[in-house]
Image (tube, rainbow, N blue to C red):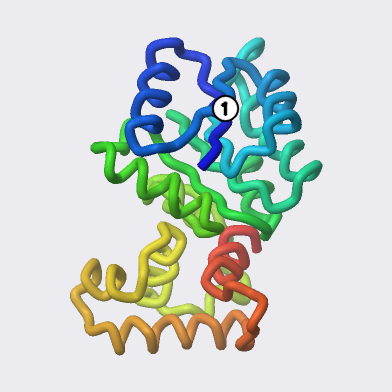
Amino acid sequence: MRVVLAEDLFLLRQGIIQLLEAYDFEVVAAVDNGTDLAAAITEHRPDIAIVDVRLPPTFTTEGLQAALRARRERPGLPILVLSQHVEQMYARELLADGTGGIGYLLKDSVLDDEQFIDAVRRVAAGGTAMDTAVVAQLMTSHSRDEPLAALTAREREVLELMAEGCSNTAIAQRLTITEGAAAKHISNIFTKLMLPPSGDSNRRVLAVLAYLNA
């Protein structure tokens, strides 16, 4: 699997490269700024881009902005954001794209290599990997006077775990309920969000996007 990495801190960048290569990923480019990130994605057409939010020269949102431009030029490019900050506006725009895998992890929340590698693989495969703190910030910033207020408290909990990329089994374990109950909650969410069965659409991703970007 081919990876383009954007991280401005040298030691952290080298550490991520070594970790990825230990799990048989090929890091085709490792850059420290948004301009070089865009060029590397265009040149190498990676399977996934791992991107820090704040990059030179202003250290504000260059990484996310470069990721958004890359998604516009190459729809469906899987992107995993790895940052110390939650940039809500750009995160919502990235999620609203609706194509390709998306992940947003906070650096302080990555506790071991398996957690990180699982997130990389999940996003590269077209899924989601959202840090719980990121999901919480995006969700709590919403007005509750919206159609999504029809969701029950339990359904919101299930939807938050769906946003993290949890399977039905994982949701059941986290909430201490049966898999059947988890499946029923998910079915209710799809119904309330008017997401009918479709052979082409990932309703789990669409449900998360509908909630986070309403």
Residue 155: image x %, image y %?
Answer: 41, 77
Q: Height in image: 151 above or below 196?
A: above
Instruction: Please tell me which residue lies in front, 81 or 117.
Output: 117
At a point 59% along the width and 44% down the height, the residue shown is: 47
- Residue shown at the point (36%, 43%) measured from the top left: 117
Q: Position of residue 133 (x, y in %)?
A: 38, 46
Q: Position of residue 160 (x, y in %)?
A: 42, 63
**Going 58% across and 37% down the picture, which residue do you hit?**
49
Secondary structure under tag 1 reads strand
From what the image shows, is residue 184 above or below residue 91?
A: below
Is residue 53 visible in the rendered structure shown here? no
Residue 172 seen from this side: yes
Give the residue at mark 1. 28
Q: Residue furthest right?
A: 73
Check the image and report above or below for 127 versus 157.
Answer: above
- Amino acid type indicated by mark 1: Val
Count of numbered badges drawn on the protein: 1
Q: Is residue 94 above or below residue 39?
A: below
The foreground one among 54 and 41 is 41
Q: Residues within 10 Å of mark 1 (few under 14, many from 20)?
A: some
How far across and how far down the image is residue 157, in percent?
36, 68
Location of the C terminus by quadrant is bottom right
Q: Determine whether, in the image, residue 201 is placed left or right of residue 159.
A: right
* 44, 203: nearer the viewer: 44
